Every structure is written in C-alpha cells, then in structure tokens.
Image: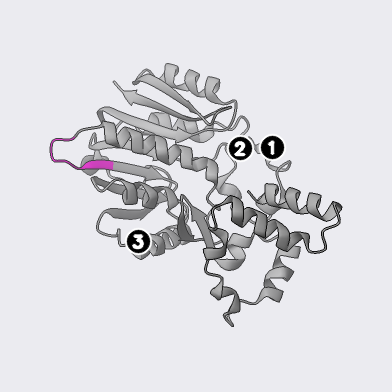
Amino acid sequence: MFEAFTRSCKILREQGLEDSFVETLRLFDLLSGGRLSTIDVSRLEEPDLDLKRIAELRNTGVPMEYIVGRAVFMGMSFHCTPDTLIPRKETELLVRSTLDLIRARKNNDGNLAIMELGIGCGNITVALAMNAPNVKIHASDICPKAVEVARKNVISYGLDDRISLSCGNLFAPFDTKEYGESIDIVVCNPPYIPTGSIEKMDSAITEHEPILALDAGAYGIDIFRRLIAGAVPYLKSGGILIFEIGAGQEKLVNMLFKKNKAYENVTHTDDGNDVRVISAQKK
C-alpha cells in the first residue's frame, strides 16, 4: 500500500500537480470508499507525540514501529519494542493456516491446547486466541523482555485467563510430565535466515531488530531441526506441528520430516508464489 501511494504521488508530481501528496490522499480516499477520511488523526496533535523527534529517529533508520512503540498485525494493535521482531504481514498466512486447523479439529471437552514458541510481542498467540475462543495457549520466548512485552499485549486484550507465558529456549519451559502428549497444535514463526544472508538484509532490520530472532545458522534450518524433534513428546497422537519457513526452504524441511519418521501428512501452504508455511501430523 505504501509503495503504491509513493508511486502514485510521484506520477502526479511529475504531471505538474502542485500538491501531489494531498491529491494522492484524496485519490486513495475515493478508491477506498471514503475510509481514509474517517481515520482518527487526533493523536497527531497530542503533546507527547514529538514529530520532530520521530523525524530525527527515522533519519537514523529506526523503524517507525519502535519509535511509536506500536505495531499492527491482522488489524490489531500491539505494543512493540526492539526486544521483539516487528510483526510481518506475511506471518498472517501462518495464523490463518493455524486457525483452519483449529476449526477442523475436535476435542472431547471442547477446548484445544496450543503451544507457541518464540512469541516475540505475542501477536500470533493473541491473534489465535481472539479468533478461536476454544483454545488455551502455552507460549514461550527465550528473551525475558520479549515475554514482558507479550504479557502487556495479552492483558490489553483480556486474554490472560487463556494464555500462559513462560521464559525459556523453545520447549525448555514446559515440563514433559505436565505437558507430555497433551498439545493439539505446536505453532512457531522461527528464525529462518541463513547466517550468511543476514548482512545482505536491509539495515533497518539488521541494526535495530533482534538478530537472535532472525539468524538460523548456515542453511537457515537449525531451529527447524529442533522444532521437528522437540515437538514429538508434547504433541498428542494426530497432533500437528506448523511453522513459517523462508522462500525455497520446503525441500530441506521435507527431508527433515522424512528423516524424523514421527510425522505424516506433510502439508505446504503458499502465499500465491512461494511455500511459506509447512505443517505435519504426528503419527
């Protein structure tokens, strides 16, 4: 949307319109059925919103989400700090795919047990809970500060009775005696960027977002290995592991599932071009 707006503004400016920015806003408002003109912009007038300071920080490359302390995911607003990744629109595919699994899955007591690993600001967990009232979610993150950010978001959406948060590396916070073979779905948006590709990424990401949440080793599959092996003791028979992957990684992940032998029904979900979500069922 932002790229289209910038492109349209540039074209109108090149055609000689004196105020191409305002004209582009008017065009987008008309094309959106008047939705732009109904947006509440009163916060821009609040004294705590220092536009000059925002401009200074943006000029140094700090992402707008970190400056304002908020991010948007699936139409919901989340507290967001440099201790957590900024939620990406492409991760909505992971949430939608998981919701499809939840709707298709039945449980005798009506409730499903979900486990999310590497929660960041909690956007995936909150989105799942908001859209599936029949789930209880056990979520963890290796970063204590990220857990606290997620806790703010869980509380702000009134979900603290259905979402429990723990700090630790992947499955470490969960005692297998309590959680063993009790989980219906394990979901994760893991690091999947190969170490050698990190330096090629936009500096706005590499200089400001947590590298620990991006770097997944030489081939970008280190966490995939741990997820596939680690989920087995926690999943019920027929339980599902689902996670996001990088473009072009599905063949490597297929090999990992085949080698493990504890799973069946490996499923790929694409974004229209690349496979970005993969899931498998415990035998």
Q: In the rendered view of the protein, which quadrant contains the C terminus?
A: top left
Q: Residue at x 38, y 25 (%)?
A: 280
Mark 1 falls on what kind of element? helix
Give how far across and how far down residue 101 sits, in percent.
32, 33
Mark pair 2, 3: CA separation: 31 Å
Between discs 1 and 3, the one toward the N terminus: 3
Q: Residue at x 41, y 28 (%)?
A: 279
Do the residues bearing badges 1 and 2 touch, measured as CB atoms within 8 Å? yes
- Is residue 36 left or right of 167 when viewed as pictured? right
**Residue 66 numbered mark, or none:** none
Do the residues bearing badges 1 and 3 touch, measured as CB atoms within 8 Å? no
**Residue 157 numbered mark, or none:** 3
Would you place residue 127 above or below residue 179 in this image? below
Mark pair 1, 2: CA separation: 7 Å
Q: Amino acid at mark 3?
A: Tyr
Q: Amino acid at mark 1?
A: Ser
User: Foreground mark, 2 or 3?
Assistant: 3
Task: Quickly name the residue at label 1.
Answer: 197
Give how far across and how far down residue 105 sits, in percent.
25, 32
The magenta segment? 107-113
Q: Residue at x 49, y 18 (%)?
A: 255
- For the rendered model, the colour scheme is one colour
Would you place residue 16 above or below residue 54 in this image? above
**Residue 193 numbered mark, or none:** 2
- Is residue 16 left or right of 86 when viewed as pictured? right
Q: Residues within 10 Å of mark 2 (few under 14, many from 20)?
A: many
Quarter-of-image position of residue 231? top left
Q: Is residue 109 magenta?
A: yes
Q: Nearer the viewer, residue 229 or 240?
A: 240
Q: Is residue 46 visible?
A: yes
